[in-house]
Image (cartoon, helix red, strand yellow):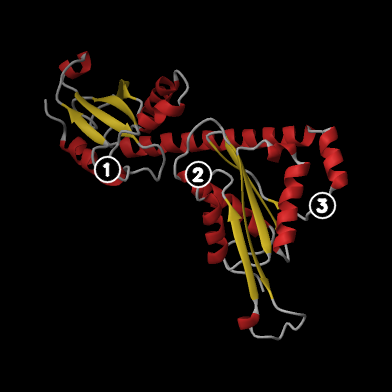
């Protein structure tokens, strides 16, 4: 029995919203449900509300589920069902825990059943309900990880070598403004910034941080950037043509990250400030997205320091 007109329209709508190939009919009748006249389809479940397709048009990164639709769907009392997992996706293979795909399939099946009402197509509502539940779970996990990070950080006692290092420093503790950590796939990005008036002061602040915080010293990367603008002498009325500009950055092994931080500061027109973004690697590769997270962490620090407004990347007057 061919799929109903409503199901055909729903397939077209789902593929328009989430990307071509998201929902595809299956010709084979390999199950009892299909033999009874139902319709089989493969659903490449979006990973998030923003997930459409990869840059190359591929959906291989998604979890793929086999769905069954009753013969008269949606004009029937029986809801569609999840028959099983077809594939877990390339990205999922890199960080999914054993059994996670089966759990996700059951979770989507529950969303499918709760979204169905006789006479109405339900797949869009089921996908959105599933994504909301996943997002809430992710936010809860990140909140717990952030709480754990702060608890561990607060419980740390300074080592003897750290105390000795602090005593030997010739600069006062820098007035760091520390932003909330940005956490993704267990990688933690923590940014801090401080006002500076010279390259030497910026370098001293960075060194002081590394000397006094063993967590920073043991981090995967400490990416830094600063921009400083000085006028010759004490005459602040002189033309900006006479100003001396200093700017520099350090990737600390994260290729191009320092340059991106510096570029962010240029776009935001920030001066006389140094920023440090520390990353603790969580065991899962983030790909190019790590640069967006680094910049997000830095911007959060600038906002918290009052250097920019929340709604526009402009200096406060």
Determine whether the residue tagged by mark 2 lies in a helix, strand or loop.
helix
Can residue 18 be seen at all in this image of the molecule? yes
Of the numbered discs in the image, which one, if any, rests on residue 290?
Answer: 2
Task: Please indicate whether residue 245 sits to the left or right of residue 68 in the image.
Answer: right
Determine whether the residue tagged by mark 1 lies in a helix, strand or loop.
loop
x and y percentages locating residue 136 in the rendered image: 52, 37
The numbered mark, 2 or 3, whose residue comes first in the sequence reads 3
Q: What residue is rendered at 18% in x and 19% in y?
A: 34
The numbered mark, 1 or 2, whose residue comes first in the sequence reads 1
Q: Residue furthest top?
A: 32
Q: Residues within 10 Å of mark 3 (few under 14, many from 20)?
A: few
Q: What residue is rendered at 73% in x and 60% in y?
A: 200
x and y percentages locating residue 120 in the rendered image: 28, 37
x and y percentages locating residue 284 in the rendered image: 50, 32
Q: Which residue is mark 1?
A: 57
- How far is disc 1 from disc 3 in space, using C-alphas? 51 Å
- Tag in front: 2 or 3: 3
Task: Please tell me in which quadrant of the rendered image residue 269 appears.
Answer: bottom right
The numbered mark, 1 or 3, whose residue comes first in the sequence reads 1
Q: What residue is rendered at 75% in x and 60% in y?
A: 201
Determine whether the residue tagged by mark 3 lies in a helix, strand or loop.
loop
Rendered position, 240 above or below 206: below
Can residue 312 be seen at all in this image of the molecule? no
x and y percentages locating residue 64 in the rendered image: 31, 28
Location of the N terminus by quadrant is top left
Q: Which residue is mark 3?
A: 173
């Amino acid at each position: 029995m061919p799929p109903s007109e409503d199901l055909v329209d729903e397939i077209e709508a789902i593929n328009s919203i989430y990307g071509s190939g998201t929902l595809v009919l299956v010709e084979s009748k390999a199950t009892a449900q299909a033999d009874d006249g139902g319709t089989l389809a493969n659903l490449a479940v979006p990973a998030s509300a923003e997930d459409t397709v990869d840059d190359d048009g591929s959906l291989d990164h998604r979890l793929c589920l086999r769905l069954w639709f009753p013969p008269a769907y949606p004009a029937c009392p029986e809801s569609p069902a999840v028959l099983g997992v077809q594939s877990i996706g390339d990205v999922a293979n890199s960080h999914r825990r054993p059994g996670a795909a089966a759990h996700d399939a059951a979770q989507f099946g529950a969303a499918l059943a709760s979204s169905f009402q006789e006479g109405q197509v339900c797949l869009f509502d089921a996908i959105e309900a599933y994504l909301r539940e996943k997002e809430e779970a992710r936010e809860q996990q990140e909140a717990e990880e952030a709480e754990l990070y702060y608890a561990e950080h607060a419980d740390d006692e300074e080592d003897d070598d750290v105390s000795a290092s602090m005593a030997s420093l010739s600069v006062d503790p820098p007035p760091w403004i520390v932003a909330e950590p940005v956490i993704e796939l267990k990688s933690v990005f923590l940014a801090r910034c401080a006002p500076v008036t010279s390259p030497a002061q910026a370098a001293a602040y960075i060194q002081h941080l590394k000397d006094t915080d063993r967590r920073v010293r043991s981090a995967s990367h400490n990416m830094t950037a600063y921009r400083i603008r000085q006028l010759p002498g004490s005459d602040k009325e002189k033309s900006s043509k006479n100003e001396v500009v200093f700017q520099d950055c350090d990737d600390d092994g994260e290729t191009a990250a320092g340059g991106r931080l510096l570029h962010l500061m240029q776009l935001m027109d920030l001066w006389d400030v140094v920023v440090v973004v520390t990353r603790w690697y969580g065991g899962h590769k983030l790909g190019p997205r790590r640069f967006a997270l680094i910049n997000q962490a830095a911007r959060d620090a600038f906002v918290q320091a009052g250097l920019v407004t929340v709604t526009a990347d402009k200096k406060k007057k």
